[in-house]
Image (cartoon, rainbow, N blue to C red):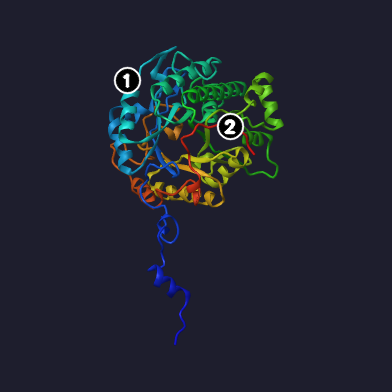
Amino acid sequence: MTEKGFLSYIKKHHSDGVYAGDEFGGGKGRDGSGLPVDNLANFMFATGIECSYPTINNGKTRRDLLEECGHYKNMKEDLGLVKELGLKVLRYGLPYYSINKSDGKYDWSFADEAMNEIKRLGITPILDLMHFGVPDWVGNFQNPELPIHFAKYADAVAERYPWVRFYTPVNEIYVSAKASAKDGLWNEQKKDDKSFVTAIKNLVASSIMANHMIAKRKPNCIIVQSESAEYVHELAATISKETTLINKLRFLSLDLLYAHPPDADVCMYLLDNGVTREEFNWFMAGEPPGYQIMGNDYYGRNEIIKLPDGSLLNASDVLGWYQVTKEYYERYKKPVMHTETNVLNADEAVVWLYKQWINVLQIRKDGIPVLGFTWYSLIDQVDWDIELAEKKGTVNSCGLYDMNRKPRPVAQAYKNLLEQFGRITIVPYGEVFELTERQAQLKVEV
């Protein structure tokens, strides 16, 4: 006679061995598949509407990508595409330069229409308040009054749309300052260290002050600070002081924003280029209020190889988002979001999407909390192959949809990802960790 094992007795008393309650985790628990639902514990899949608006030609020409990519006339269709994909989260930028007509004067006509539609569709916006430009009457990033003007605008936005909880006060502070005041491409079009430092400190101060205004009206606000994750690889036995400094300065905006003391080289650089001791102490007093998320934007072209003759090559994905972001995380210990990625060649987009998602999965395995992922942007862009420096009108095929609002293959690939992973939690087995509705209070790292 064959001796019965334990499983035969379990099946006798509990059917197939799955007992009441197992559907909430266990043999029949969920694996996280299925399109996203509204759940504060769940990972946030997102896209974005490209909304850059710097000036070029010494302020004579305004680049408004909302206009150039057709969003103003296709706003409802674009937002409908977000919904159709199954996405719940959208990085969305209101055009600060055209809304804020003068000090305390606003034109909310387009903003109200767009925000009402976003709310109607049940989309969660991560509201982007400054994206590479300012109103003409403010001037540019060299204006020391910028933090005051921008804080007033942020307060007005938070008052007008009290249902919004997620914000990016100033998009890519480091890139904004570098392109405008070091590389000479946009806005003030300066090319010197002092102008770069001035732009950085004014932009970080603007972000901090805007954050304070938002938190006064929304104590449980969630700030997703989107910043470019970069690295320069120098092919030399002895790395130059210039490259060493560049790789330190990529942290500068977040160091000032999160009150993380820079090292001696960067402190000397700041003091040499106009930051006063009083200003430095103000930045180091403490990080801004609310829940803080470190958003890392990553394109393959973010990594550069510097050859011995000084020439530069776009490295495209040497370390990758995972390795670069891990360095940022270890520095700031902030929850992470992959806030931007794309490739300019549509034929490479599907593979690039999968590579970025694998990076996200790997960093999660290492215990780093990643709250979300963003393919940027929904629609193809214009002239980003030349960083908007000239108005040529070249369409960059980096969107989930083309300019005619027809899906590219990457749109279906993204939807396939959503169907597989759309209900995973922020960290594995993360039902006990979620973004609550309570206001943020504890700001001490222990």
Badge 1 crowding class, 10 Å Cα cut-off, few under 14, some 14 to 19, many 20 or more, is: few
Image quadrant where one finds the N terminus: bottom left
Provide the residue designation for mark 1. 109
Where 228 falls versus 192 (above or below)?
below
Image quadrant where one finds the C terminus: top right
Provide the residue designation for mark 2. 254
Q: Secondary structure at mark 2?
A: helix
399 left or right, relative to 294: left
Closer-to-camera residue (30/351): 30
Q: Is residue 309 in sight in this rendering?
A: no
Where 194 falls versus 413 (above or below)?
above
Which tag, 2 or 1, sits closer to the chain's start?
1
Picture residue at 38% right of the left edge, 41% below the top: 38
User: What amino acid is at disc 2?
Assistant: Leu
Mark number displayed over residue 411: none
Where 112 falls versus 137 (above or below)?
below
Determine the CA span between mark 2 and mark 1.
34 Å
